[in-house]
Image (tube, rainbow, N blue to C red):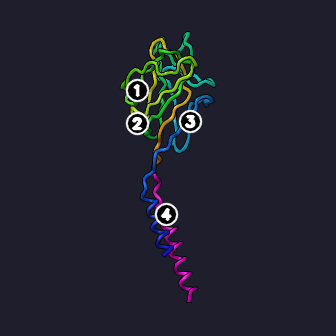
Amino acid sequence: MRVVVLCLFVCLLSVFPAFAIPVTFDFSDSPSDYYFPKADLTLNVSAGLATVTDTSRGLGVDAGGSDSGTLDGDGAFEALWFSFSEKVRLVDASFYWVDVGDAFAFSLGDGDQFGEVEDILRIGDKDGFFDFTAHNLSSQMFGIKASEGSSFRVTTLTVDFTPVPTPEPSTYLLFGSGVAGLFFWRRCHSG
């Protein structure tokens, strides 16, 4: 009876779907190649024709000339592009060195502008946080572009990631043969 219950339990576990897990990417100590592997998910950060800049305060963009190195709307089109190895749902982002009235435009991977978000940052402390969960945005690529006159860095990005379940037919075969072996061993030695 125990063997039957154990087999039913294993079958039940194999039927349950995988749930999304939150994965946070912290850009305060960025590698120079802007490649972030984490929990079966990888992230590459790029800036189109500009150059990604990093400090202990997060990621920005340098479009050349006298550009500040932060993500700002001055001069050339500056955007940070976040490319993931799998489709993810954007949960939140945090920013550094922001002022009241700083705004950004948000884009999905197809390049369509999502829209302006203004005055999203906490007043007075130069730090900000934005929660994207109400927008339910899913893609493999996201872009954040500063509006003209804004200036900030992206410090963290949190996404929900649903790992692809790994098929385990060989494990089930091995487990089944082990259970059958135990059953026959017990049967032979019980007489």
Task: Give the camera-side residue of 93 and 171.
Answer: 93
Task: Give the camera-side residue of 31 and 127.
Answer: 127
Q: Is residue 124 magenta?
A: no
Residue 183 is situated, as x and y percent measured from the top left of the image, at 52, 78
Which stretch did the figure color magenta?
A: 164-191
User: From what the image shows, is residue 93 above or below residue 163?
Assistant: above
Direction from residue 141 to residue 97 in the image, left or right: right
Say few, some or many: other residues with alpha carbon within 10 Å of mark 1 (under 14 / 14 to 19 / 20 or more).
some
Say few, some or many: other residues with alpha carbon within 10 Å of mark 2 (under 14 / 14 to 19 / 20 or more).
some
Residue at the top extreme, as displayed: 66
Q: Which residue is mark 1?
A: 107
Lower position in the chain sequence, tag 4 or tag 1: 1
Residue 108 is situated, as x and y percent measured from the top left of the image, at 40, 29
**Disc 4 secondary structure class:** helix
Whether pointer 4 and pointer 1 mark residues with C-beta atoms closer than 8 Å, the reply is no
Give the alpha-carbon distance from disc 2 to disc 3, as whole Å.
19 Å
Residue 17 is situated, as x and y percent measured from the top left of the image, at 42, 53
Residue 16 is situated, as x and y percent measured from the top left of the image, at 43, 56
Q: Which mark is residue 170?
A: 4
Please state the total of marks drawn on the protein image: 4
Lower position in the chain sequence, tag 2 or tag 4: 2
Q: Which residue is mark 3?
A: 36
